[in-house]
Image: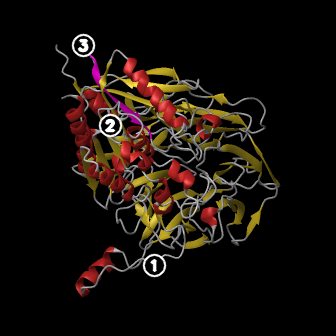
Amino acid sequence: MPNKKTPITPADLTRLVTPFDPCLSPQGDLVTYSRKHIDGNTTKVNVWCVSSSGGRSRRLTNGDKDSHARFSPDGASIAFLSYRDKERPQIRLLDREGGESTAITTLPAGTLSSFKWAPDGKSIAFAWRAADAHRTESAAKKRQADKLSEPPRVITTPWYRLDGDGYFEQRRFVLKIVDVETGTVRTLWNKDSLGWFSYDWSPNSQTIALNTMRGKRAMFDSNTELLLLNVKSGKTKALPGIPDGPKTGIAYSPCGKYLAWAGRQGKDGWYSTENLELYVCDAAKGKATSLSNKTDLCLLAATLGDSSEVSFEPNLKWTPDSKSLLVRIGHHGTVQTMRFARSGRGAPVAMTSGSKVHDHTNIAAGSMAMMIESATRPGEVHIMSIKGGSPKRLTHCNDALLKQRLVAKPSSHWITTPQGTKVHVWMLTPPKLKNARRRPGVLQVHGGPHGQYGCMFFHEFQCQAGDGHVVVYSNPRGSKGYGRDHCASIRGAWGTTDWIDIRAVANWMMTRPEINAKRMAIMGGSYGGYMTNWAIGHTNDFACAITDRCVSNMVSMAGNSDYMEKPWHYFDGNFWDAPEARWKSSPIRFAGKWKTPTLVIHSEGDLRCNIEQAEQVYAALQIRNIPSRFVRYPRSTSHGLSRGGPADLRQHRLGEILDWLAKYLKR
């Protein structure tokens, strides 16, 4: 029979299914997971489960915005987070066998971000933030009936908005606790200045360990406190010998004697060019030590993709004997689970291997649940022994789609720059290429810049390869996953060694027999948009460019992003009377040299890279009469449109990209 498989297209976006956040039951026999899919133009999320021995999955919840399922300590019940009433999310409880769920909480309008069972099963701690009473749906309806205008926002703190989260002004997440039997809710901690705290229960359910920041200037202060919070009295205790610096991911050991977290010393925040390290201390006496400072590994090396959840949060889990920690480590485009001995003796041991992204979630009954993804297969739920061995796949969410599609397989390469730096590069050729004809090439640059490309399934890349392009992506200096020095090379100096590496990748593309050197494009989003803007100001080798949710002016960017940039820190100077370093690294400074036809894409609701960054680019292109097109997505979308926006707009974006490439690379 003839092969009827066809290349992946933008339309396949609505057929991709994303399982995530698996949770293994205490008995080790059942795994729950959240399952995201697109129905029409609506993204729906339900909780499903599957036996740990394999077999068919079954749906557990009836709502379309249910996630974060967690087994009770005895394994008899499952609590989950439900946004069935989008203004009033609740924690609901379900029998592990299924049936109707009941709400444990009756919270007013607000946001519920996470929760954790107390080990005794009597209480659940959760992070909650109240809604703005003036901006609820009911308040909007009343204003409309009264013919009143939308109220103004009154801001008094530097931390008042976050991309994808919106404007929360002075409201913050607080730590609350609910009695599972009575539904009684009380507040345990409301003194965090940013609402970014991490927390964990002690095994005896009497104490909660807390990473928290206090003070009016917390946004500009990197030091996170480690406090022990007495659940009954609310009193706090600080442990001695805890180094200053950012801390997150706090975790009690199962024996209750130790605490672990991810952090570093110094004045940098958690997102930094410096390695994020694994710390452990005595839960009663303090005196922290780093378990990873003798390595060049970072707990914050996230691998970027567009078809699954991407988290920059560190992932660390204690083994049941409290002697080791299993930690997610990004390395050379892969993500592996590594074991660190609590004693600090010996080198960390990789529990997983191969060109894949592994993300373990919880440990029970000697096994761990995890997500595994590769460049040719979207993520699926797996289970694996904590002693090692081969992971067992439990879900098959995208098998039907993949059986009908030609999937491009990347080849891995290392190139050497003129400075002698080794740069990791991947190349996707059109699937099942039947002749040696040179094809147009697309150079993709990742965002961050302190993340990494690698072994993630990238729907956008597959669409471009399926349309006949050779897609090249790499991890130039500034990327995580290749050691501290590789990442820190561009600190305060974007457009320097990173451009040397990107230039070297482009030159390598021109030598490849698969690529037509006269038909090459460069594109990227966020920092990738920055580098696209920088590239067209320093070379005319690209037939076209696509700058997506970009940065163009580092001076104005420092003051209009959701993250206000500290002066004299990452970049020298400030953005008002000492802007020289930021201006030196600004691509808009070279707009007078631009000649490349450029597609500009941006969301009006982008709070990370404000749309004025794209407006400056488009204005310069138009004034200089360079072929250009500006696609502006509505205020309801954010910086993460390409990964989590409405399906119709994501497909529209992919169509705009393919049309632009066709116009300038295939003519």
In this figure, which residue is indicated by the disc labeled 2?
460
What secondary structure is marked by label 3? loop
Q: Is residue 661 magenta?
A: no
What secondary structure is marked by label 2? helix
Res 434 label: 3
In this figure, which residue is indicated by the disc labeled 1?
154
For badge 3, the amino acid type reads Lys
- Counting residues from the start of the chain, the first of labels 3 and 2 encountered is 3
Residue at left offset 34%, top offset 62%: 84
Residue at left offset 25%, top offset 15%: 437
- Counting residues from the start of the chain, the first of labels 2 and 1 encountered is 1
Contact check, label 3 and label 1, Cβ < 8 Å: no
Residue ranking furthest to the bottom:
146
Give percent across and percent down for residue 355: 49, 25
Q: Is residue 123 left or right of residue 340?
A: left
Contact check, label 2 and label 1, Cβ < 8 Å: no
For badge 2, the amino acid type reads Glu
Which image quadrant is residue 301 in? top right
Q: CA distance from mark 2 to mark 1?
A: 40 Å
Q: Is residue 440 magenta?
A: yes
For badge 1, the amino acid type reads Val
